[in-house]
Amino acid sequence: MPWINNLKSQGVECHLLQDGAPAHKSRIARDYLTTERIDWLWGPGHLPDINASEHAWPWIRRHVTRDFTPSCTEKKCERQWVQEWEDMSIEVINKWVMHVPKVVRLIIQHGGKNDFHG
C-alpha cells in the first residue's frame, strides 16, 4: 500500500477497488486498510474490465487460433502462446490500459457494481 499512501500524500484521491475474493473480505485485510487509512470500494467478484491484463488472454487465444495449426504437444503450445505474447503491439496494450480509468469511474458511479454494460 505504500504507493497509495504516496499518491495520497501528493493530494491524489485514491480508492482501492476490491473484488469479492475471500482474502479481500477477511477481517485482517479490512483491519489493515482501516489502520492504513485506505479507502476502498467493493466491486463485483470478478473485475476483468479494470484489469488490462485480462484482455490479453482472449487476444492471444484468437491470434494463436488464427496464426497456427493446432498444437499437439505442450512445448508447441507454449511456443505459440509466447510468440503471440511477443508479437502483441504496445498500441494494443495501451488501448486496454487507457480504458481502465473510464471503467473505474463508471463502477464508482454505480456504487461498486459492474452493471453498466447495458
Image: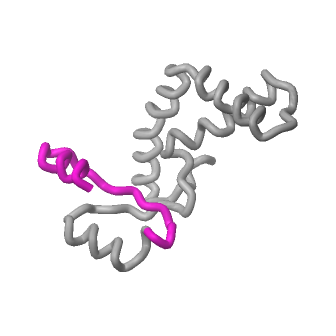
Q: Is residue 82 above or below residue 109?
A: above
Picture coordinates of residue 54, whole percent (x, y)? 57, 43
Picture coordinates of residue 36, whole percent (x, y)? 20, 65
**103 relative position to 16: left or right:** right
Q: Is residue 31 above or below residue 41?
A: below
Picture coordinates of residue 105, whole percent (x, y)? 40, 46
Q: Which image quadrant is residue 39 in?
A: bottom left
**Residue at image point 86% right, 26% down:** 69
Q: Which image quadrant is residue 85 in?
A: top right
Q: Is residue 91 above or below residue 118?
A: above
Q: Which image quadrant is residue 86 in?
A: top right
Q: Is residue 16 magenta?
A: yes
**Residue at image point 81% right, 24% down:** 68
Q: Quadrant of the N terminus?
A: bottom left
**Residue at image point 75% right, 36% down:** 75
Magenta residues (range): 1-23
Picture coordinates of residue 89, whole percent (x, y)? 55, 20
Residue that protrudes farthest toward the bottom in the picture: 27
**69 relative position to 95: left or right:** right
